[in-house]
Image: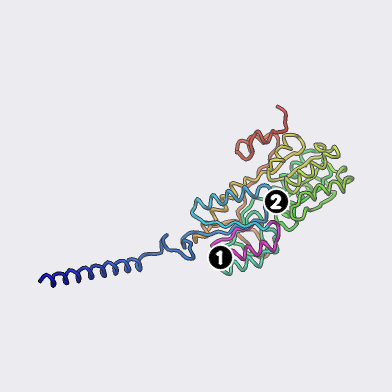
Amino acid sequence: MKMKNRNNIKRIEVTLIITIMLVAVLAGCNSSNTEEDTKGGKNVNTPTIGLSFDSYIIERWERDRDVFVSTAKEMGAEINVQSANGDIETQISQIEYFIEKKVDVIVIVAIDADKLTDVVKKAKDAGIHVIAYDRLIRNANVDMYISFDNEQVGEMMGEEIASHKENKKVIMICGAPADNNVSMVNEGFETVMKKNNIQIIDKTFCEGWKAELAADYVKDHLDAVSAADAIMCGNDDIATNVIRMLAVYRKAGVIDIVGQDADLAACQHIVEGTQNITVYKPVEKLASEAAKYAVDMAKGNGIGAKPTINDGSYNVPYVALDPISVNKNNIDEIIIDSGFHSREDVYLNVAE
């Protein structure tokens, strides 16, 4: 009898073990695709975003990157950041890498407005959303273009120069011609010049946004520069190089200078009296807004009705933020009080 009882106990134990194993297997089979499910080691529900930068040659880009990444991460997204160091073929390769990785959204600060069209179409054919960040990509039908109102930037520069009635002649030292924003800024600026009968006596461009080319221009065209009442600079880095070269010829502070981006050097020049204005573009707002749109797209959410801009072939959704003209009268309120630059840094070279 004892032997029979032992056998019965063993049968019960085996039956219990089999039952537990079956329950575990069935529970695993019935589990939904939640955070525990992975694909390639990555949570399939985590929004993935590829962020492709032209380069960090312009001071503001690192600030844009940091705000975008922190905002997107707070929303639960995974970010892969690449910089092409100003080389268009590198940027194309990096975007192709994002396509291979099957990210949900690619956000691009374009080196060249025309040369990314094909790779953007390739991304869209793969079902990946594309956002053109700050610079429009032409003929590509991106899902969104988000930037500042670039024509308004040019208008603000022009209005500052026109406000000084003695200004009759101006030189334009523009940014990279491959950057679509440059043509938009120039259009706004030139409209104001024409309206105020101010003559543009020369116009040049800095390929690849290489600001040192602006210094070379001043040195090589000193007669034209000496005849100008004002110089419109494509950004503050260009303005800084112009001012430094003007200082060599004792003309800094004599010729009106305007720029954009609110670089620290530009803010210092404004309080020192060698640059009239900079057009401040609150990049924290731009980067955070872009990150929110990117994460929403990755989650399959719509962006709602938006104004559009024509990219040459398509009307694409356009989010345009307002820039702010900054001069010595409002620099404390706009730049310092907002925390964009510290008072100590802005007034570094100004005696108390």
| Res. 144 mark | none
Q: Position of residue 316 (x, y in %)?
A: 62, 61
Residue flagged by tag 2: what amino acid is it?
Ile
* Residue holding disc 2: 57
Residue flagged by tag 1: what amino acid is it?
Lys
In the visual, does 221 lie left or right of 333?
Answer: right
Q: Is residue 94 visible?
A: yes
Q: Position of residue 221 (x, y in %)?
A: 87, 48
Quadrant location of the C terminus in the rendered image: top right
Q: Earlier in the sequence, mark 2 or mark 1?
A: 2
Q: Is residue 291 above or below residue 330?
A: below
> Who's the residue at 60% across and 49% down the image?
286
In the visual, does 284 lie left or right of 202?
Answer: left
Tell which residue pokes out farthest to the right in this image: 223
Magenta span of residues: 85-108
* CB contact under 8 Å: marks 2 and 1: no
Residue 97 colored magenta?
Answer: yes
